[in-house]
Image (cartoon, rainbow, N blue to C red):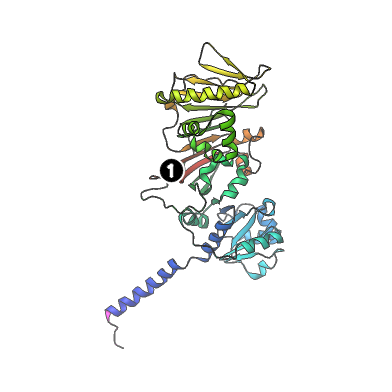
Amino acid sequence: MPHLPLAVTLVTTLGLLLVPAFLLRRLPRPQAIGLEKLMANVSLLQSFRPNPDRPVPELWRARLGRETAEQLWRFQTRTWWQFWDGHADGQPYLALSSRGLSESVLRTVVIPPVRVGDLVIFPPDPFSRQILNQRLQPLVRRSSGLRLRCLPRLENGQAVFWRPVGLGVLLGPLAPLFQDFQEGCLSLTIHDDGLIWTGEAASVEGMVLQVPNGSSEGPAQPLLSPPAPDVLLEVQGASLEQLLSGLLARELIRQPLAERYGLGPEQLALLRQTPFQLVLRPRAYGPYQASIELQVAVGPTRVTQWKAVLSRLTKSLEKEGLRPRTKESEPTVLWQRSDGVVVGGWQWQGGTNGITLFLGPQPNGTAGFQSQALPARTGMVLRARPRDLAERGLLPPDLPEVVRRSTWIGLSSDPFPGYGSPAPLSQLQGSLTFRP
């Protein structure tokens, strides 16, 4: 039999290698199709690594039945998922890879599962199954940007993905403070004392921005230290815009600020560009269970503007029936009710470097505040003691139990290089711990 010419052999070999590779790139994996559809429709999606040595999760027992759940759990080898879609009174769905799931096993489940791509989804009740099935029918545009980068996190490890509706449910009234993190994805790492995470978030749902070349995401590291013992919550940032943008986007808030407190567009523009530190401290006695301190960096060029803001605020508070009490020994103004109880005030710190505004009694230990003590960064840092906040009823009730029971939590965000502030795309990392 004559030998094929070398060129023909080479072309044939390359074809056998390149055509499947091309098709794999053009045709997404069935599992990826399922995850993409879920990401476009659900509010919160979390992935878990297989770990048959741990006890069977209650979610598996509830969706599969005790016997089937224990059987499948013992032989699991693939990532699995739970998610919420805003229906079924907050009850989660269970999603498993269809590979290795026999039809006979699926027939033992009381509520028939929903198939999407290579995923089998087990709903909490028949109505939820019907709603989800309808929502997953339309074709979904291929993922791009943040969602595309999130897919391998959800497929191969322990991760969480959220959309604005999920963030709103979890954070409740605190959601406007996290306006820059409307949609995001985090990889989670469990350690002996808690969790570590790293990932990204976008200020707008469906963000398709690409990560700039040269950006690299290293492994998440626990923040080095917890808040001070007398601090429940601490937030630092390069600009109050990061803290206020979600609130000031609402006319319902802007209007009374302008009409009642004299804080119009010019004053709000000043607030937005000011570095800050917000601190929440517990109070063991008195009419308040906690006090709030807001330290802002003024600097010599903005003293006149800030004095004008405080002058407007003074007139408004007097109209509210509050009386000022100024200390002669230091530049402090305390505001009190008719019964003499101090409800707040402000104090100039470090000459004219900064101001501490406070609600509740006058804080201790603010002397010596310097503007350079605030973070020289373009992002934001949050540190809190969730367990102590929960005991005082100061946490949203729908936060995950693992967060509510943690001793302290830390989160840092920075814009990706090349994106200014406010950042449309932020890098996130942080940790929570259960240590005493």
Magenta extent:
1-6
Asked if 178 appears above or below 85 in the picture, the reply is: above
Q: Is residue 403 left or right of residue 146?
A: right
Q: Position of residue 39 (x, y in %)?
A: 55, 56
Where residue 254 sits, quadrant-wise, is top right
User: Looking at the image, which residue sits at the far left?
Assistant: 6
Residue in view at x 49 percent, y 24 percent: 308
Asked if 23 appears above or below 186 in the picture, the reply is: below
Q: Viewer-proximal residue, 181 or 227?
A: 181
Q: Viewer-proximal residue, 406 or 398?
A: 398
Quadrant containing the C terminus in the rendered view? top right
Quadrant containing the N terminus in the rendered view? bottom left
Q: Position of residue 298 (x, y in %)?
A: 44, 26
Residue in view at x 58 percent, y 57 percent: 41
Q: Secondary structure at mark 1?
A: strand
Disc 1 marks a residue whose amino acid type is: Pro
Q: Viewer-proximal residue, 11 or 281?
A: 281
Q: Is residue 314 left or right of residue 301?
A: right
Asked if 364 appears above or below 124 in the picture, the reply is: above
Residue in view at x 63 percent, y 20 percent: 322
